[in-house]
Image (cartoon, rainbow, N blue to C red):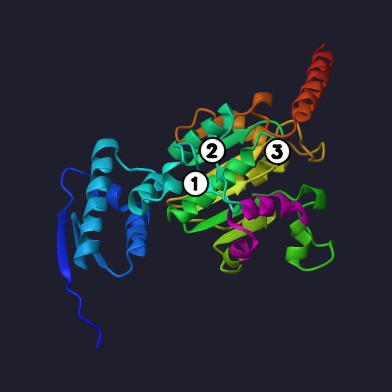
Amino acid sequence: MEEKKDIFELNYQLEEINPLHFFGPNDSYLDFLRQTYPDTKIIARGTEIKVLGEPEKIQKILQIIESLYQEVKKYGQPEFIKVKQIISGKKEWSDVDKDSIIKGFNDKWIKPKTPGQKKLVETVENHDIIFAVGPAGTGKTYIAVALAVKGLKEKKYKKIVLVRPAVEAGESLGFLPGDLKEKIDPYLRPLYDSLEDMIGPEKLNGYLEKNIIEIVPLAYMRGRTLNQSIIIMDEAQNATETQMKMFLTRLGQESKIIVTGDQSQIDLPKSQKSGLIQAVKLLKNVEGIGFVLFNTQDVVRHPLVTKIINAYEKINHSTDKNEKS
């Protein structure tokens, strides 16, 4: 006959702090504590935490609660990485520096490597619409996707929507062979690659099937309003002025939009103007909208990429001067 174990009860009052900072967005910190100690019952009501379980586990949870309480009291709401370090006590969390975003599929931590990337992380934290503009190879979209995955894991968002203008196909896509997925995949492949780096192909397929992650061409965003979502538009320089206005007005409650683009790589027909260029000019002084401008110092690809970009920029500058004269 199985021996009956004693069950103890712990009651803890969260005084002098905001309990939402302790429990985390949508109770994500509390849920991680529950997952770490599945044999205990952890109940939160207002500013009170009640824990039912064996004495040994109750004592460990009390130590965690007190450590997390002191962290919140001293610094405010902590990053999820810090919370995991406190709850799990694993070395893998204590080795993570404050700049780390998420742990990638290859077990390496993804974190900003350049001043521009660090500025993007900070700007995303403090704004609901963010424009990240600069040359190829600066990691704008990669860091934006990492922040989106982090927000999804921490339950800040219920959905990630990744968008690209499929300008090479005229955005109609109707004349291309195959079903919708086969038609748009070539244009959206870079976004798939970034996501696979972060969560792996199998988990990504699961998220796509459940519609938790959507990867769609810009033309299919019309008429939607997205709540509690993080929405990223990549290659935004290829959105027309009308499309950019349509996209930015998709923002719903508790959502965030990140727009990434390179103003030097516009593929639109000469008769159409880039919505990215217009938006940067029109919205630069709007409160709540943040701007991060990347430059060649932020390039994280092969060193030759920086030299190539610099060479082409010199040509563009000389062309502009000739046209003005």
Residue at 35% across, 43% down: 78
Residue 197 in the image, given as x and y percentages of width and height = 63, 51
User: Label 1: which residue?
Assistant: 256
SS at mark 1 in the image: strand
From this view, report whether residue 102 is shown above or below residue 261. Answer: below
From this view, report whether residue 320 is shown above or below residue 1. Answer: above
Q: Which circle marks residue 144 in the picture?
A: none
SS at mark 3 in the image: helix
Magenta part mainly helix, strand or loop?
helix
Identity, as a three-letter code, of the amino acid under mark 1: Lys
From this view, report whether residue 224 is shown above or below residue 320. Answer: below
Residue 34 in the image, given as x and y percentages of width and height = 33, 63
Q: What's the magenta region?
A: 186-205
- The local crowd at label 2, few if under 14, some if 14 to 19, many if 20 or more residues have their Cα within 10 Å, is many
Q: Which circle marks residue 130 in the picture?
A: 2
Residue at 62% across, 55% down: 221
Residue at 59% across, 52% down: 198
SS at mark 2 in the image: strand
Q: Is residue 76 left or right of residue 318?
A: left
Identity, as a three-letter code, of the amino acid under mark 2: Ile
Residues 247 and 146: in front is 146
Q: Which circle marks residue 237 in the picture?
A: 3
Residue 86 in the image, given as x and y percentages of width and height = 33, 48
